Amino acid sequence: MPRSIAQEQDILKLPAPKSPPQLTSRRIGIHTSTSGGVETAAERAYRLGCNTFQIFSSSPRQWKPYLLGRSQCDQMRGLREKYGIKPLVIHTNYLINLAGVNPEFLGKSIEAFRAELERALALCAEYLVLHPGSFRGSSREEGLDRVAAAIREAANGLDLKAGNLTVLIENTAGAEYSLGGSFEQVAELVAKLRGLIPIGACIDTCHTHVAGYDIVSEAGMHETLAQLDATVGLKNVAVWHCNDAKAARGSKLDRHQHVGKGMIGLEPFRRLLNDPRTAHSAFIAETPIDEPGDDLRNVETLKGLVQEE
Ligand SMILES: [Zn+2]
Ligand SMILES: [Zn+2]
């Protein structure tokens, strides 16, 4: 999970770059701070050398929604057009659990998810990433059905298609009771929602690794991508969260590390970024900021792996 950046490390406080950043043929970005208003994130993403980025559109750990102003949406759109930054990915609030059994909590989650959809539409975001949630207290199958029903209810009356907004189901680290720990579960949910709303997947490299898939060896990555293609379908993976992992394969511990500095290492990211089957995807880091400049370094590391034709 992404962390917000401290003020003193904010790239907006540094002098503006003299020349436009070098970009690659791949869409590469990072989870970006919205400190000072959501629209400020587009300028940050540009200065970090990104051509795509991810934000929270509201506080990620509070129920109280952030109220978006019309001028903020216009500014965000204007900056993205000026810099050619696309897609804009929004990550939903962590409190939302659309698979839960508690009716009060589920009701709150549906309301909060609807507000996420409304803000994503207002900001002209292309993607809204959702963790499928925890089914504790029921069966996995019932959990999946609850998520599908909850998303349908939350999206009722909203025209996602006209807004060019697609909801992406993210694979998870595979903790007990959490949905989405396998590609099959992500695929099942995507299948249940197909036809109801524009739907796709977001695959996180750290989650994939700690859930038990081998992406470290070349043969393992080949096999894992084949499994992903056979279930979710690589064409449906619109966003890759490019995070290295602090924990071992199969540990189910979700601890993100800087790209190339963890248990996954640099080579798997090189293979992923240069695979022709992922050329349509956006690659977004959700790496920690331990030292000032870590955000810029992770973006540059990813960009440095792209082999141009
Ligand atoms: Zn996530
Ligand atoms: Zn994570």
Image: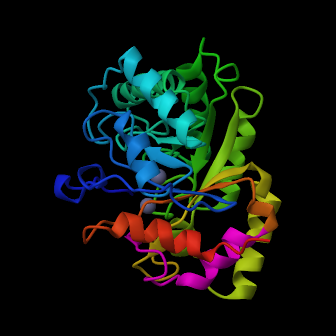
* Res 86 → quadrant: top right
Question: In the image as oriented, which residue stretches furthest toward the front?
Answer: 18
Task: Locate residue 132, reporting x and y percent.
Answer: 53, 45
Q: Residue at x 55, y 83 (%)?
A: 266
* Res 24 → quadrant: bottom right
Query: Is residue 54 or residue 71 the one in the foreground?
Result: 71
Query: Is residue 14 or residue 109 the one in the foreground?
Result: 14
Task: Locate residue 59, reporting x and y percent.
Answer: 29, 37
Colouring used for the render: rainbow
Q: Which residues are magenta?
A: 255-275
On the question of residue 134 being in view, the answer is no
Question: In the image as oriented, which residue stretches furthest toward the left?
Answer: 8
Can residue 256 be found in the magenta stretch? yes
Can residue 23 be found in the magenta stretch? no
Q: Residue at x 67, y 60 (%)?
A: 26
Task: Locate residue 66, reporting x and y percent.
Answer: 30, 26
Task: Locate residue 264, reporting x and y percent.
Answer: 53, 82
Report whether 224 appears left or right of 16.
Answer: right
In this rendering, is residue 16 above or below 226?
above
Report whether 189 appears left or right of 10.
Answer: right
Query: Is residue 49 or residue 6 the one in the foreground?
Result: 49
